Image (cartoon, rainbow, N blue to C red):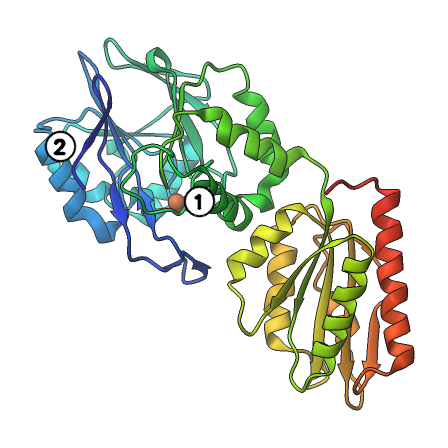
Amino acid sequence: MKPRKIKSGIYWVGTVDWDRRLFDELIPLPDGTSYNAYLIKGNEKTALIDTVDPTMTRAFFDNLNQLGIKNIDYIVANHAEQDHSGTLPQVLEQYPNAKVVVTPKCKDLLTNMLLIHQNRIMTVEDGKTLSLGNKTLEFIYAPWVHWPETMLSYLREDGILFTCDLFGSHFATSDLYVTDEAAVYEAAKRYYAEIMMPFRKVIERNLEKIKDLQINMVAPSHGPIYDNPEFILEAYRDWVYAPPKNIVVLPYISMHGSTQKMVEYFVGALVERGLTVKQFNLAKSDIGKLAISLVDAATIVVGSPTVLAGPHPNVVFATYLANALRPKLKFASIIGSYGWGGRMVEQITGMLSNLNVELLEPVVIKGFPKEENLRALDRLADQILNKHNESNLKK
Ligand code: FEO
């Protein structure tokens, strides 16, 4: 992709990674991603906002060469993670006058992770500005979105907020701006769920911090630019602040059909009571879809057979993930079966320590479900309905 002009003196110079399917060897990327970098040419100084993943260094330099960039004064590193900072060493080599502009925490990370010499780095305080002549960058500390060193950069004259990971989406597209809102909403929600949700409380403070800025565009470092910033700001307010919705998430595994039968019966019982259910067979599901569903859900019910006296390993992974992502869940329970015993319930509940949930009576049975087991599932469905009603949850 060639460089793209955003406004006078402001260019997108990033790269689009259409083929990447996994991030951190963990997070599925069904839609690829992009590493957005931005070049700002003031009438006195030139600044680069972030760089790109080291796998795309060549394409990135092609962009800078096509714009004929002979000198860069500042490279603002809003975040130290390598998908944005990984090409910094090469950029510093190519542009010997450039200084990297960072928070003090970012300086520490860049010197340790990328071995960048501290003489090439200048730190900025929260709220400080940097003049490029006719353009001014203001730096806004926004720690823990999603590393401790993260900051946002606000281009005052144009009202552009460069947010790096915050508000981003893993979404490869040839569009510079959001065009397909539904597709970007899904990708941005996936991104929020997988990357940002564990830091919900901090994001709440960061949203407060930027609420009085005149923002004409939000320019993240993944996915398209939001030329209608309210689209993503409103989505974040819903994901971060709003109470959970009348949704039950049910990740499960079944080995020989007993848990499957319980899940099928239980989902029917919940739906009959007017609840929305998101069911995930963990042998086949995209774990990102499970993460998305946790953004709004009020209840999680984990379904598992008993394997070697504990839950199925896929259930362990999903439970660990749900706990680590710290969603807004209010209630949790467990359903499943065993052949001759085990400690599945204790092991699953022991993995939910981050979640502020009320545990509802699990239904764990011996063998294939019988009539009394189905009645126990009805009672659990009644209890979930009552709890949701008492909490006044909306669809
Ligand atoms: Fe896109 Fe936290 O790196």
Q: In front here: 67 or 147? A: 67
Drawn side of residue 258 relative to residue 360, left or right: left
Residue 368, compared with residue 104, is above or below; it is below
Look at the numbered disc 1 and say if its residue's Cβ is closer than 8 Å to ligand 1. no
Q: Which residue is mark 2?
A: 96
Q: Where's the N terminus, which quadrant?
A: top left
The residue located at (21%, 43%) in the rendering is 89
The residue located at (52%, 44%) in the rendering is 189
Residue closest to the far front? 272
| Percent x, y of residue 110 | 34, 42
Q: Which mark is residue 183?
A: 1
Q: Amino acid at mark 1?
A: Ala
Instruction: Tell me, yes or no, if residue 102 can be seen here.
Output: yes
What's the CA distance linking mark 1 and mark 2? Answer: 41 Å
Q: Which mark is residue 298?
A: none
Residue closest to the far bottom? 340
Give the total of numbered labels. 2
The residue located at (33%, 34%) in the rendering is 77
Q: Quadrant of residue 277?
A: bottom right
Residue 213, compared with residue 109, is above or below; it is above
Drawn side of residue 238 relative to residue 379, left or right: left
| Percent x, y of residue 211 | 55, 19
Sequence-wise first label, 1 or 2:
2
Q: Residues within 10 Å of mark 1 (few under 14, many from 20)?
A: few
Instruction: Tell me, yes or no, if residue 142 can be seen here.
Output: no
Q: Nearer the viewer, mark 1 or mark 2?
A: 1
| Percent x, y of residue 241 | 66, 33
Secondary structure state at the residue bearing disc 2: loop
Q: Amino acid at mark 2?
A: Pro
Residue 309, compared with residue 319, is above or below; it is below
